[in-house]
Image (cartoon, rainbow, N blue to C red):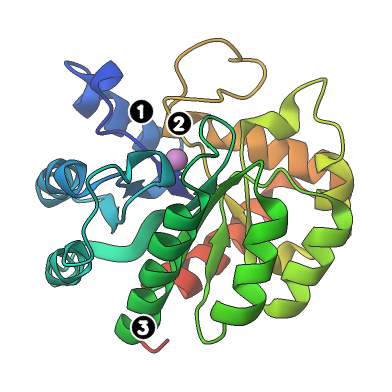
Amino acid sequence: MIFIDTHAHIDDEQFEGERQAVIRRAEDAGVKKIINMSVSLANAQRVLQIASAEEIVFAGVGVHPEEIDGFDFHHIDELAHLTENEKVVAIGEIGLDYHFRDDNKEEQRKIFIAQLDLARQLHLPVSIHARDAHGDLMAILRREGKGVQGSIHCYSGSVEMAKELLHMGWFIGIDGPLTFKNAAKLPDVVKMLPLERLLLETDCPYLAPVPMRGKKNEPAFLPYIAAKIAEIKEIAPEEVALKTTENAEHLFFDKKL
Ligand code: NI
């Protein structure tokens, strides 16, 4: 089986000293591409270094909502400049996070919208993070998301919200939490969504799937998420691998977009 990890952070310092081994283990597990998302401009430089050195690693460049302190709108031009690197396949990760901070919501929304605009201009897909901000996310995507493609990363919303995202043409990123006992509504979301709209991602080093839960997550663990999707949808894991890889190829690597 062949997989693509559509949202990873293998630049994380937790992988220091074993990054190459992690990438080799991913290849051994059938992972043929890893998209390493950035969280800030400074971090994007580091992510691009790794992507340049490792054939199977690609990059997203973007500013995460928790990293917007000191953001200036000329940083959008710097992001645009970074996308000239041939390993950049996405604007990400971007979005809204009101969990740890809700004192800068307006600023978060403005910076998110500016990055959606950038993605639209550059014809690049986005990887969107949303935590405790689903109402505002949907309001922004309805108004400002037209003409932008991408995925709602590590999906944690309701079945109803997933239905609307489906109709709007968004992909849904599925991570380790699907395998957790307290996965709540996520299995229902996976059951409802067509395989054509699902993407596999680890968000490593966080959120390792069962049976690796609690350990440091890595791209080689993607097959556990695929297996869980197969179990829920009562189909073969091979079909999940094939279709989600096709989806990722189409969204992030099809230059005809
Ligand atoms: Ni992430």
Tell me the number on the disc at residue 3: none
- Of marks 1 and 3, the one in the foreground: 3
Which quadrant of the frame does ligand 1 lie within? top left
Q: Which class describes the residues within 10 Å of circle 2: few (<14), some (14-19), or many (20+)?
A: many
Dot 1 lies on which element? Answer: helix
Dot 3 lies on which element? Answer: loop
**Looking at the rendering, which quadrant does residue 239 occupy?**
bottom right
Residue at 44% in and 47% down: 7
Find disc 1 in the rendering and name its residue. 25
- Assess whether mark 2 and mark 1 are in contact (beta carbons under 8 angstroms): yes
Q: Residue furthest front?
A: 103
Type of the residue with mark 1: Arg
Residue 129 locus on image (x, y percent): 53, 49
Find disc 3 in the rendering and name its residue. 123
Q: Which class describes the residues within 10 Å of circle 3: few (<14), some (14-19), or many (20+)?
A: some
What is the C-alpha distance between the residues marked 1 and 2? 6 Å
Q: Does residue 30 show up?
A: no
Compared to residue 203, the image places residue 249 above or below, namely below
Type of the residue with mark 3: His
Compared to residue 94, the image places residue 218 above or below, namely above
**For this view, does 225 lie left or right of residue 145?**
right
Of callouts 2 and 3, the N-terminal one = 3
Residue at 80% in and 41% down: 186
**Looking at the rendering, which quadrant does residue 228 occupy?**
top right
**For this view, does 198 lie left or right of residue 35?**
right
- Assess whether mark 3 and mark 1 are in contact (beta carbons under 8 angstroms): no
> In the image shown, does 220 or 170 lie closer to the viewer?
170
User: Mark 3 vs ligand 1: CB under 8 Å?
Assistant: no
User: Mark 1 vs ligand 1: CB under 8 Å?
Assistant: no
Of callouts 1 and 2, the N-terminal one = 1
Residue at 25% in and 46% down: 40
Find disc 2 in the rendering and name its residue. 220
